[in-house]
Amino acid sequence: MSCHRLLGLVALDLALGVATLEQGQFWHITDHHFDPTYWSEMRSCNDKVPVRGIYGDYWCDSPWRLVNDSVAAMANVKRDVDFILWTGDNVAHIKNQFLNQSLNLEITEKITDALKAEFPGVPVYGIMGNHDWFPANQFPVQQAFLYNATAELWRDWIGDNQQIENFKKGGFYTIRTTKGLRIVGLNTVFYYAADKLTTNLTDPAGQFAWLEEVLQNATNVGEKVMLTAHVPPGIKVPGKVQWFYERFNTKFLDLVQKYADIIPGMYFGHDHADGLKLLLKKDGTPGIPMFIAPSVTPWRYKSGTESDDPHNPAVRLVKYDQKTGEALDFIQYYMNLTESNEANASSWKVAYDASKAYQVKDLSAASVSMAVKQMSKDKYVLDKYIRFNTVLANGNTTVNECDATCRAEYICSFTHHEGEKFNSCVTGLMKGVLIG
């Protein structure tokens, strides 16, 4: 072998080594909804006859055993991650009369301690969910006990005193990773239609102005920004629910769309279901992928005769580029709740590998756009997405029950995030008879 070729191979090996070092991993976890009354009053259970298993029930929020087991399972799979995104809703679906500020804080503290015990030295970028406040959903726009107490609880992770003050002002902050990636934790509960304290406001706690300043500063210095929050914008399907107030939905989407070139991804919870969406740029080209992680809690919504489909507990491991923040892949782990309860032992399995499931090389905006187009054209690929939506809890049942209108709604929700545009998309697809 010639000296030049040998040097070339060495250079190639070094280049590959550098590329490998730039690939990191992080966990995305959300919606634990720990119910301390699961073994007593069962206050989160919304069915009269739940089957009370040791890891929970599809009609109830999480017993501690499920919450703790999910954290231990994460550590067993991958403990040495770069960080953890924790997108809130730690407190169960329990009526306000049975909760208070101190109890809510204790629940968040208990999960915080579990994460610190299993992941020593790993930074956790947490954000509050709508159920973490007392009373639920009603986030104020000035300093309050739960802002202050949670900021101090997470001081080791947030670090910077200025960001601690931002959190105390409204539950939002920003931090830079050691690799130069900027993380922005937002309080999107301000924009949630259930928060009656922000109904008549234009910029609750000044978060929009703050976010634009952060994004503009990042643009000026060449930083990439990963956004994380609890409540997602856009339209949730099935159900056709828009969580945000209309004006906040539009304002948020317009703002992040303006800075799409520096935002490689946005990460949300709240839906309890597995979701993938794409925010397009003004010119219609791929903009920002939106990753909505499924919940740890198996709790199902129920009102009268209507209810959500059952879904399994889940945690997500994301592979990403440490410098650009671009998602390269993620592996969705889940617990088959029925099997684990019957065996009296948990079994966390891989539900799917995103890049393989959607046949894309990574999870960049361009690749997610390709995946969305595949789901729009190929019934088989869309069927997989619908199964993943409930974390494999229903086999083919949900897919078989999804008619042409249901499929049109799924397809339109991928890229149409405002009510009027979403409805027009669904109408157009139905008239075209392109799916079914």
Image (cartoon, rainbow, N blue to C red):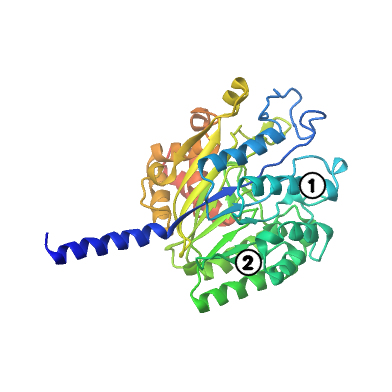
In the image shown, does 80 or 297 lie closer to the viewer?
Answer: 80
Q: Residue furthest top?
A: 342
Q: Is residue 249 visible?
A: yes
Quadrant assignment, res 251 = bottom right
x and y percentages locating residue 184 in the rendered image: 60, 64
Q: Going by the image, does 393 lie left or right of 33? A: left
**What label sits on residue 252 in the rendered view?**
none
| Disc 1 residue type (three-letter) | Glu
Q: Is residue 164 above or below residue 196?
A: below
Q: Going by the image, does 195 lie left or right of 26? A: right
Identify the residue shown where x is 73% and y is 51%: 130
Identify the residue shown where x is 71% and y is 32%: 60
Q: Is residue 180 above or below residue 329?
A: below
Q: Which residue is mark 2?
A: 174
Identify the residue shown where x is 74% and y is 22%: 49
Q: Is residue 128 above or below residue 93?
A: below
| Disc 2 residue type (three-letter) | Thr
Q: Residue furthest bottom?
A: 220
x and y percentages locating residue 182 in the rendered image: 55, 66
Q: Residue furthest right?
A: 97
Q: CA distance from mark 1 to mark 2?
A: 24 Å
Q: Is residue 245 visible?
A: no
Instruction: Label 1, secondary structure: give it.
Output: helix
x and y percentages locating residue 224 in the rendered image: 50, 68
Quadrant assignment, res 141 = bottom right
x and y percentages locating residue 3 in the rendered image: 14, 65
Instruction: Label 2, secondary structure: give it.
Output: strand
Question: Would you call the spot at circle 1 few (<14 residues within 10 Å), some (14-19), or many (20 or more)?
Answer: few
The earlier-in-sequence mark between 1 and 2 is 1
Q: Which residue is mark 1?
A: 106
Question: Would you call the spot at circle 2 few (<14 residues within 10 Å), some (14-19), or many (20 or more)?
Answer: many
Q: Quadrant of the C terminus?
A: top left
